[in-house]
Amino acid sequence: MTRRTTAGTVAVALAGALTLSACTGDDTNTTASASASADAISITVATVGDIGLEALADEYMTDHPNVTITVEEQAYAALHDDLQSELVAGEGAPTIAVLDEAYMPSFVGQSDGFVNLLDLGADEFESSVLPWAWGEATNANGSATIGIPASVSGLALCYRRDLLEDAGLTGDRDELSTLMGDSWEGFISVGEQYTAATGGYFLDTAASLLNPLMMQAGVSYFDTDNALAMDGVEAPYATAVAAATSGISSGTTQWSEDWTNGLYDDSFATVLCPSWMLAYIEENAPEDFSGQWDVADIPGAGGNWSANFYTIPAQSDDETTQAAYEFIEWLMKDEQQLARFQAVGALPATPSLYSDEGIQAYTNSFFNNAPVGQIFTKTAEDLTTSTYYSLNNATIRTAVENVLSKVELGSITEDDAWSEAKSAAKAANGD
């Protein structure tokens, strides 16, 4: 049985365009287990919008008639904020909560409120999922894992091929990658060529570069003792500052009305985009705009923007907890992961599936038939570093990126940028 409480998110809108080749998965028969017992078991699964679990839950219940699974679709902030309140109260949490990576630092820091999935055998997935994704759900000393990576997004460069061609640059995705030379310095250089030729902006905002640069470097704002540690951030920040002061970025705040309009006029020519952003760009486009956007690999060693994790709050009895884990195990089988990709475009967190023909062959006609299945799985797999996040990571990130935006607007000089960023980080951390 399923129940919807809100509309799905932007990320989910990618779903409708996907088609996959037929695929087969692992045997779904289970041995003696909680979900195979005679006792009736009820499992609630909280998700942000439709993540492709409804049909799978129905299939699972058919094979496990004693299990009732209710999928509760919620709004993004509401799911995570409600769960935080339920953890504090010690009651009311869903049996399974599918959480976004942006909230994982906070919840990993409250691991006592979740079942340590290592105690249920989750280490069986550690070698098969993307290492950086596994790390995001595991505490600093590796003694507790609160989530199993359910899906990732990858990160690519969405660009206006028509604007690049009008500037005398290439609109071909492979040639563009060659021109950038797989470096952010090359990216900035191409941007400077575009701006010199057109007088326009190449990038929406330089602030969007910092987090991908830090992910590629595997650095955080904190050390594993949760002390503010900015030294590792300096080099990625310097690259983002170089973009901010080069004149290539418009400084447009992402998700603002100006930004959405800028996707279709000549306000800027590129944005860093995860797989789920493609749907937003397509859905908001004017008529007859298809084919002007394209997608290319980003410079550097991969990237990702948003991943989901299966977690089990520690509020159910042992039998229900075991049944919930068995359902998660079943969802992690190849057939179910590929079914979710088919249904909602959720890229599996298991890279062995990336060679599946349905993923490799998927293209997006709106984006000039870009091979987005290949591009986004490549960037997700290329990201090898796992970044440590503290409870206060989001607060520090906002403070530092605000300084970067001021550099972009010219209110803070390039020479003062790093000292201002460090001061903002310390103030935001209460130091």
Image (cartoon, rainbow, N blue to C red):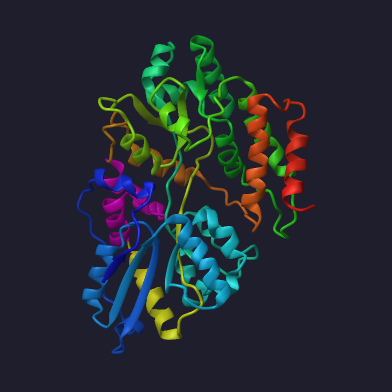
Residue 79 vertical position relative to residue 222 in the rendered view, above or below: below
Quarter of the rendering occupied by the N terminus: bottom left
Q: Residue at x 30, y 67 (%)?
A: 3
- Quick check: can you spot residue 298? yes
Q: Position of residue 343 (x, y in %)?
A: 27, 53
Q: Which residues are magenta?
A: 334-361
Left or right: 10, with 243 as reference point? left
Left or right: 323, with 82 as reference point? left
Residue 408 vertical position relative to residue 53 in the rendered view, above or below: above
Q: Position of residue 49 (x, y in %)?
A: 36, 56
Q: Position of residue 268 (x, y in %)?
A: 47, 23
- Which residue is nearer to you in this view: 372 or 93? 93
Q: Residue at x 33, y 57 (%)?
A: 50
- Quick check: can you spot residue 27? no
Q: Residue at x 61, y 51 (%)?
A: 394
- Which residue is nearer to you in this view: 68 or 171? 68
Question: In the current view of this chain or complex, which residue is farthest to the front?
Answer: 257
Q: Quadrant of residue 209?
A: top right
Residue 339 vertical position relative to residue 247 in the rendered view, above or below: below
- Which residue is nearer to you in this view: 13 or 34? 13
Decide whether residue 35 is among the magenta residues.
no
Left or right: 233, with 65 as reference point? right
Question: How many numbered circles are shown?
Answer: 0
Q: Position of residue 57 (x, y in %)?
A: 28, 68
Magenta: main secondary structure: helix
Question: In the current view of this chain or complex, which residue is farthest to the bottom?
Answer: 38
Q: Quadrant of residue 294?
A: top left
Residue 178 vertical position relative to residue 303 in the rendered view, above or below: above
Q: Quadrant of residue 338?
A: bottom left
